Amino acid sequence: MLLEKIVDSIIRNASGGKRSIGSQFDPTYIKNMIHSFRAAKIEADYKKNGSINPVCYQKYYLTYFDAMQQSNNGDNFLLFTLPQVIQLGEEDGIRYIGSIYGSHAFDRIKSRGMLNTLNSNRITAIKNNTRTIYALFDGAARRLEIYNDMELTEGLVEGIFANPGDVPSWNEEKDDYPLNEDAIAELETLVYRDRTLIDKATKPEQDFNIPQITPTAPPKYLPKAE
Amino acid sequence: MSSLKDCVAAAKLQLNIEVTDYDPWFRKRAYDAMRKFNNPDVIIKKNMTCKIDSNGRIELPSDFYQCIVVRVHQPHHDSDNDSDDHHHQHNHGGYRYYLDTPFFQNCGFHDRGNVRCGSFQINGSFIQFNGDFKKMYEASMTYLAYQSDKDGEICVPDSYEECIMYFLCYQFSLMKEKPAIILAEYRGNYNATFNKINGDAQVNFFARVRPQIMEAFNSVVGNKNIYITK
């Protein structure tokens, strides 16, 4: 299903198809909400079932930019940009980093602390395993570091990205939204319920459908029982 | 022969791990498991040429098992430093040799011949030479190493693969705090395969040295020829 149809379905539930720009059912705002709830839904399913529907995956193709490389890194690794990914429990949303044909996966290094630990050991030191290509994803800088292959010009990352629109291979107007169909109905319900619940919680006086009961103030001093 | 990479792949299939997040950890643990066997069949001789740094150290390669000899090349014509002339008197055509004498004595070689040797210690992941290395010297080391395939992966016999796989599964389950029944299953399988491999190695060793044992035994007993069958 296209993203536009999901947005339209949610707005129709709330306002019968009337689109009001700037309100809480603003289409752009609803799109961002859908991305957030998609991440939460995939993570919940992964914790429950231990697996991910392959429809949720996206392919991000790495491209080499000479201007991005740092001159003071000792020529130890190459730098590539990578969008933000979601977190799945102990693992992150990256499921594959490797060659562009998808047949050779690079070894993942989960953090810089792990990189330091690996380099501290003679067996696992990166410079001693020159035939193994390592990949480290720096989530703060949103970039990917590739070790032990200074001639790499292209690559493939397959994973679940926080904003599907950040991936160039996904066309919002033509491609289906990267979420399985059975989860889309639940996603629409979640977004709609979230919007309406927040509305009632923050502005209860504006909801005239619910009769408001104002409690009478109790007396300050109760009469003593004789 | 299969490689440690095959063992890691088998363990990942068993544990249903799709990502490569734990691959460096698996490779390290597979290396540890392989070292437990101490089988001389997987060890070969290798040569390596490297530079000695200013601290007099050589970094050991990852497949290092045992050093045999190190030959350090010292240039003859060195007018910058007069102290090098003192070392030239002990050179053999511009080379200085370093032998691992304790290892050779353990192997039964007590005579070093005419080779004059310096001394060194293996210090962690380095070889530390006890000499004056104010300049960068080139050294070539002959050492015993583990066999590796064309991709540089360390080889193990095929019979080891299942044992190392169970070891990796047990260690990973231990790290992930899996239920005790799964831990016990993996540990039992690992112990069974490990003992079987070690038992086979003992049988093979006995079969190899059986003629020598028979000869020595018969020389002691006298004219009675006794054949050892098992």
Image (cartoon, coloured by chain):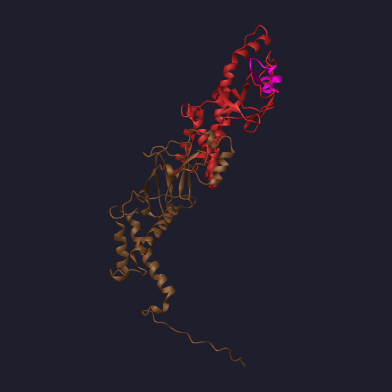
Chain colours: A brown, B red
Q: From this view, report whether residue B122 is shown above or below residue A22.
A: above
What residue sits 57% from the left and 43% below the top? A116
The N terminus of chain A lies in quadrant: bottom left
Q: From this view, report whether residue B141 is shown above or below residue A187.
A: above
Decide which of A189, B47 is in the foreground and name it: B47
* Image location (x, y in percent) of residue B69: 63, 21
Q: Is residue B81 left or right of residue A147?
A: right
* Image location (x, y in percent) of residue B184: 55, 42
* Image location (x, y in percent) of residue B9: 46, 36
Q: From this view, report whether residue A215 is shown above or below residue B198.
A: below
Q: Which residues are magenta?
A: B83-105
What residue sits 58% from the left and 28% below the top? B64
Decide which of A160, A99 is in the foreground and name it: A99
Residue B39 visible at all: no
The quadrant in which residue A180 appears is bottom left
Q: Residue furthest bottom?
A: A226
Would you say residue B102 sits in the magenta stretch?
yes
Decide which of A15, A148 is in the foreground and name it: A148
Would you say residue B38 sits in the magenta stretch?
no
The C terminus of chain A lies in quadrant: bottom right
Q: Residue furthest top?
A: B223
Q: Is residue B41 left or right of residue B121?
A: left
Q: From this view, report whether residue A132 is shown above or below residue B107.
A: below
- How many labels sit on residues? 0
